[in-house]
Image (cartoon, rainbow, N blue to C red):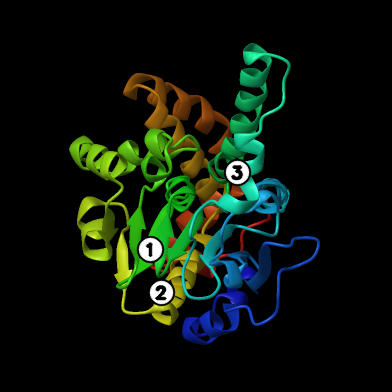
Amino acid sequence: NVNKGLQLPSQTVARAMSSLGGATPPYTTLAISRPTESITHVELHRPEKRNAMNSAFWSEMVTCFNELSEDAQCRVVVVSGAGKLFTAGIDLMDMMNSVLQPEGDDTARISWGIKKKIKKLQETFSVIEKCPKPVVVAIHGACVGAGVDMITACDIRLCTQDAWFQVKEVDIGLAADVGTLQRLPKVIGSQSLVNELALTARKMYADEAKSSGLVSRVFADKEAMMAGALEIAGEIAGRSPVAVQGTKINLIYARNHSVADGLDYIATWNMSMLQTEDLMKSAQAALEKKSPKTKTYSKL
């Protein structure tokens, strides 16, 4: 029963979520745990390298989130970083060889090869968005470069008071190409602020991240944030997975399409999804003046 898993004191579980061991095999850069039956915790786990994103990370994220998409047990995902900070971004030493020494017989062939590599890297974060399970990301310390690309693909962003964010790419001589320039303008209401952050690579601290809408909550420290992330995840996991996953999919569709197209899509979506037992169970809970979390919903 999923609801039993949600009754653990979130502070206790949050402490347990701080991974003491290493990465979870077969992964070398991620530690995967289950704080409750229906919540999966994915922790970036290269603390000695400030969770810098090496070549293994870029493929392991795809494998991990594709599996979570198919895992009927998992209803919501929490992402965080081990150690002193969330992530320092791309591992330059590890990744630069493939970028600076591309293979190919001429400019055209080299260019095709580079495009293939970029598309593959883009998938590492697009897979978070494609996962129908909501993803709550909890950021502490620093979130630099590709870290910003990553968090903009997540559904709910939380941070600690000491967190800062930096769109770093112009500082290393390139335009961000794995999601920030496409998703950040959809996340933050001000195009001027997006442009300023992307063009100057200046740091943005927690208070500005909150006021601009990059994060929805700021916590005093990491332990409080992880407890808060778990509480939000528990609220999501306790509700109908048909309703929750349909909501995420339609929110993303609506962001990318016109209002008219979005309304048509949800009408087509719900012509089948309204025919679920979850609707009656949730209505019953409302009539009983109880939370929908008191009902048990089938796996999806």
- Upstream in sequence: badge 3 or badge 1: 3
Instruction: Report which residue position mark 3 lands on.
Output: 96
CB under 8 Å between discs 3 and 1: no
At label 2, the amino acid type is Met
Q: Nearer the viewer, mark 2 or mark 3?
A: 3
For this rendering, which residue is in front, 13 or 109?
109
- Distance (Cα) linking label 2 and label 1: 7 Å
Where residue 23 appears, x then y in whole percent? 71, 69
Q: Is residue 300 above or below residue 295?
A: above
Secondary structure beneath disc 1?
strand
Residue 120 horizontal side relative to residue 27, left or right: left
CB under 8 Å between discs 2 and 1: yes
Q: Nearer the viewer, mark 3 or mark 1?
A: 3
Instruction: Report which residue position mark 2 lands on.
Output: 225
Secondary structure beneath disc 2?
helix
At label 1, the amino acid type is Leu
Where residue 177 appears, x then y in whole percent? 48, 34
Instruction: Report which residue position mark 1 lands on.
Output: 158
- Label at residue 296: none
Q: Would you call the spot at circle 3 few (<14 residues within 10 Å), some (14-19), or many (20 or more)?
A: few
Residue 136 horizontal side relative to residue 272, left or right: left
At label 3, the amino acid type is Met
- Upstream in sequence: badge 2 or badge 3: 3
